[in-house]
Amino acid sequence: MCGIAGLFIKDPTLEPDLGRLLARMTSTLRGRGPDSAGFAIYADATPGLVKLTFAAPEGTDAEALATRLLAALGVGGIAAVRHTHAVVTLPAEDVARAEAWLSENAPEASVMSTGNRLEIYKDVGDPDDVAAAFAISRMAGSHGISHTRMATESAVTTNGAHPFSTGADQCLVHNGSLSNHASLRRALRQDGIRIRTENDSEVAAGYLTRKMRDGESLDEALTSSLKDLDGFFTFVVGTENGFSVLRDPIACKPAVMAETDRYVAFASEFKSLTVLPDIASAKVWEPKPATVYFWEHS
Amino acid sequence: MPVVDLAKSSLRELNAALQQLGPTTNETDWTVLNPSGEHAIAAGVDAPVTVTIAGPVGYFCGGMNKLATLVVEGSAGQGVGENMMSGLIHVKGDASQSAGATGRGGLLIVEGNASARCGISMKGIDIVVKGGIGHLSAFMGQSGRLVVFGEAGEALGDSLYEARLYVRGPVAGLGADCIEKEMRDEHRQELFDLIKAAGEAGKVDVGEFRRYGSARKLYNFNIDNVDAY
């Protein structure tokens, strides 16, 4: 099972509704994945500054940790706290120092994402509870991806939840299962890609990160993945300005898409799309197998 | 004329009520409100009744249907009419993958597009899709007819037995042992009958369709291959 929802907004007047719509789409998919949920939101950027989103260790105060982090770095920064996560906005050149400080001083904390615009929030529990705890409904953004998880390949933990981010402003959600993730993980780690968990889906994210680091565009990297990833999958992938969908050549995992002048949407089941405006007049289709679908903000 | 609102009643209550209807019931016209994409709506009905479902349904709607007429006023999720035995299922919107899978009888009509694996392992069902169908449709189809007004995806009729396939639009590719076959009068007649049953007589020209079927090389024992066993 597992459920995926994704929304890429074309009409900027709809951007304030991104979180509300994505949370409602996700709510319809609770039955597909009651273990955990996660949300990736591409929100406004602050010129010259980068966002680092981390989950504080269980039972600790995310705000206090963020304050200590900024003080230790000695830079002006802003921390915004949502439930167990904090988003620290700081100069790009300080991101590596911030990650090093966290792994030294709060090794139980988990970096969810870094990037100009990407923020990732995820936790175990009922997807509606997760969305409410992070107040996803009140978030604006240009595109977002969510996932409800029924765990198969690794433990039910915050870090095992989707979306996975292995590169700046990149994230991936996955419905399916990969067979060759152990060997690929070793190869990717040797090649300098940081993979934090034993989860198969994180390997797919890391694979795309390596391909893009080596010069491929997102759609080229996804095309490459068709020959290198062994298993079944429906992927929805976000980058700073892009939104992409890929199904394996058999395409057994469900996927349905809708497009209007105002948005492109993806969901595991059609009922998830019914919460969107003007869905009755949208173009609705099921993506073809082994075919890369790609949209980008200019 | 019972009306069941799934915003107020549970799916189990609805299906239990439908499944206990017998051949002589007087409750022959049911309406289901607020289906909201729930799975297995009106599965396992075995009575000559009509059930109109006012909105989209999830997986396996009308599975195992026998005698009943189901009308879905919206789109249907995976496996609509899966293993249906007889009766009619009419989807007014699109159908997701595996529509009519393993169906043994009856008629499934899809007004919009169906998706991958439409009619997979069909065993006597008739399926009329007024839009297109996805890849691997009619895979291992044993009997029954599949009529498609639009296009068909890759690997149509792969490993086909004796199901007959009629497609008007372009076919992206034929599966193993599926070939185009001559349209003879008996085929034009059965195609016309199916088009008529789908309410399109006089609107759709049987002459625009091509027929596909099994080359019968894969499933028949060939003495030349005896060494392989």
Image: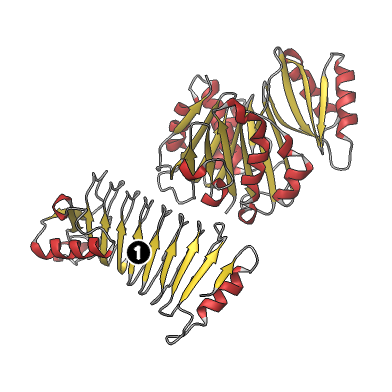
Horizontal side of residue A287 vs A36, given as left or right? left
At numbered mark 1, what does the secondary structure look like: helix, strand or loop? strand
What x and y, as percent, mark residue A12? Answer: 59, 25
> In which quadrant of the rendered image does the N terminus of chain A lie?
bottom right
Residue on which the image places disc 1 = B108
What x and y, as percent, mark residue A219? Answer: 46, 28
Q: Which residue is located at x 53 percent, y 23 percent?
A: A297
Structure colour scheme: secondary structure
In the rendered image, is residue A260 in sight? yes
Looking at the image, is A243 positioned above or below residue A35? above
Determine the residue located farthest toward the bottom in the rendered image.
Answer: B24
What x and y, as percent, mark residue A7? Answer: 57, 36
Local packing at callout 1 (Cα closer than 10 Å; few below 14, some 14-19, many 20+) is: many
What x and y, as percent, mark residue B132? Answer: 32, 48
Chain at numbered mark 1: B
Q: Nearer the viewer, residue A192 or B37?
A: B37
Determine the residue located farthest toward the front in the rendered image.
Answer: B1
Q: Nearer the viewer, residue B3 or A155?
A: B3
Q: Which residue is located at x 62 percent, y 51 percent?
A: A28
Horizontal side of residue A207 vs B147, given as left or right? right
Q: Which residue is located at x 74 percent, y 25 percent?
A: A52
> Could you say which quadrant of the image residue A54 lies in?
top right
State how many labels appear: 1
Q: Nearer the viewer, residue B77 or B75?
A: B75
In the rendered image, is residue A230 in sight? no
